[in-house]
Amino acid sequence: MATASVDKQSVDPLPGPPSIPHLSKDFIWGVSTSSFQIEGATQEDGRGLSIWDSYGRTGQVRNNDTGDIACDHYHRYKEDVALMRTLGIQAYRFSVAWPRVLPNGTGAVNEAGLAFYDRLIDELLASDIEPWLCLYHWDLPQALEDRGGWMNRESVAWFTDYATLIGKRYGRRVKRFATFNEPAIFSLFSRSFGTRDRSADDKLNRWIHHVNLAHGAAVDALRAQAPGALIGCIHNYQPIIPSSASEADVKAAALVDAYWNQAYPDPQYLGEYPQAIRAGIEPHMQPGDLARIHRPLDWFGLNHYSPVYINSDPSALIGMGWGPKPAEIPRTPIDWTIEPDAFRDTLLTVSKRYGLPVYVTENGYGRGDDEKPDEIGAVADPGRVDFLRSYISALDAAVAAGADVRGYFVWSLLDNFEWDSGYSVRFGLTYIDYKTQRRIPKSSFKWYADVIRLARGLTPAA
Ligand code: FCB
């Protein structure tokens, strides 16, 4: 088996490992990616278009970037799994591109697309890496968007058929499934509403309810096809902080909290919508809907980056304006605040509120285009190492304080297509030279590999 090289280090000795005395030896260490962000090959082997292909063609992504090639993972998946082996992870979280396996979203199945994920899953299993499969990481088939997308209640049936196909095909080999990645994010920031003003609030409510119904139906479909699989949903849960003590800002932040943090996990895990949005959802409910959404789950997926600072903006969707971030708080190069204590607190909050084992399915550090190989071809990223070190230590502190956290996945294995920012923002432990597709493990890659080995009681790599 090919093994990636991480030998070149032009940096001073790396900082030591995080302090993790409270994590058990079977704590799961992993990395996450998503289909559209890494696969490329968007027009190969019968794949249909996704909404992100269409959006890329509108020229609104920075530098006019598209996902057409991305990290060319579709062709280079073996090299990427070799990187994972070098890293020593136990689990890899990825998503299936719905339009690759069902080019029109429903109906005719694309065997060549299914076969790609067969190859990927087999390669992972042969490498002793557990596949964690997410059904939906935002790349809705364009054909379904043309039929109203998530605004159409039929989307529940479309998603159920898709989940059934995936469960049937992979359910004997894949034992961990997530239905959605960050439903709150792709709802709140969807462009499909056509408007971002308050008049879209009702559309948002309807959309949320359909996605929740689709989640519940997919859980049942997966359970029928893959008995014994462990199923969850992945939520972007962050403290929502009003940027002033004014009544308007405090009220706005409370409503954003309900939409951003609880609108999905509360009905999914607890069987009810948060009070603040119940009246808005009500017109879209049919009898029995809450029971359809509230299906038994096994774990809670937390994606966490940093708190969100909110101002009241009465003219915006749900009254959500971006508030100023306190000047004294350190930031990553892409201006996200670095607040490991907020991560610890969030882990405690979600562990207590939802009562199931929590897996951190994303956490990471983004940097702009100035992240580059040095004269000897190495990529030193001490800022990312410091970030990961402080966040992993905060995770340990949360466990010490009683949070039931069982795993941690870094976003991301590779630099990749960062949505509206295209390739201008890099989150990877591995640098991608997009001209040559060469993969260069950064110093954070080596550091994380050592953390994993130490945590698992193995000897660090030389
Ligand atoms: C999360 C997304 C992921 C990636 C990171 C930086 O919100 O799930 O795809 O873009 O942010």
Image: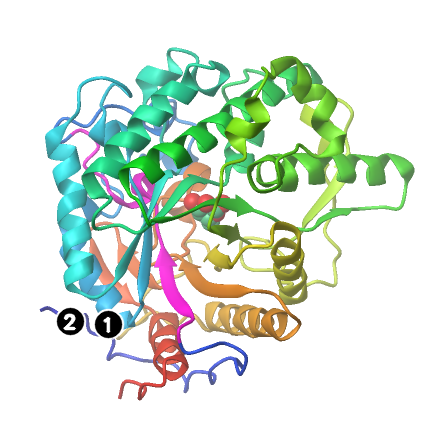
Q: Amino acid at mark 1?
A: Thr
Spatial separation of the CA atoms under disc 2 and disc 1: 6 Å
Give the vertical position of 193 relative to 230 (above or below). above
Residue sitting farthest toward the top: 147
Q: Residue at x 78, y 35 (%)?
A: 252
Front in this rendered view, residue 441 or 29: 29
Write the start and end of the magenta stretch as one range: 26-43
Q: Residues within 10 Å of mark 2 (few under 14, many from 20)?
A: some
What is the secondary structure assignment of the residue under circle 2? loop
Horizontal and vertical percent for residue 145?
39, 17
From the image, which quarter does the N terminus lie in?
bottom left
Front in this rendered view, residue 448 or 399: 399
In which quadrant of the rendered view does residue 136 lie? top left
Q: Are marks 2 and 1 in contact (CB under 8 Å)?
A: yes
- Label 2 belongs to which residue? 3
Give the vertical position of 190 relative to 353 (above or below). above
Front in this rendered view, residue 8 or 453: 453
Earlier in the chain: of badge 2 and badge 1, it is 2
Q: Residue at x 21, y 66 (%)?
A: 128
Q: Residue at x 31, y 66 (%)?
A: 90
Horizontal and vertical percent for residue 313?
77, 29
Give the vertical position of 60 relative to 104 (above or below). below
**Residue 414 visible (yes or no):** no
Front in this rendered view, residue 277 or 94: 277
- Label 1 belongs to which residue? 86
What is the secondary structure assignment of the residue under circle 1? helix
Horizontal and vertical percent for residue 312?
79, 33
From the image, which quarter does the C terminus lie in?
bottom left
Look at the image and say whether residue 30 sits in the magenta stretch. Answer: yes
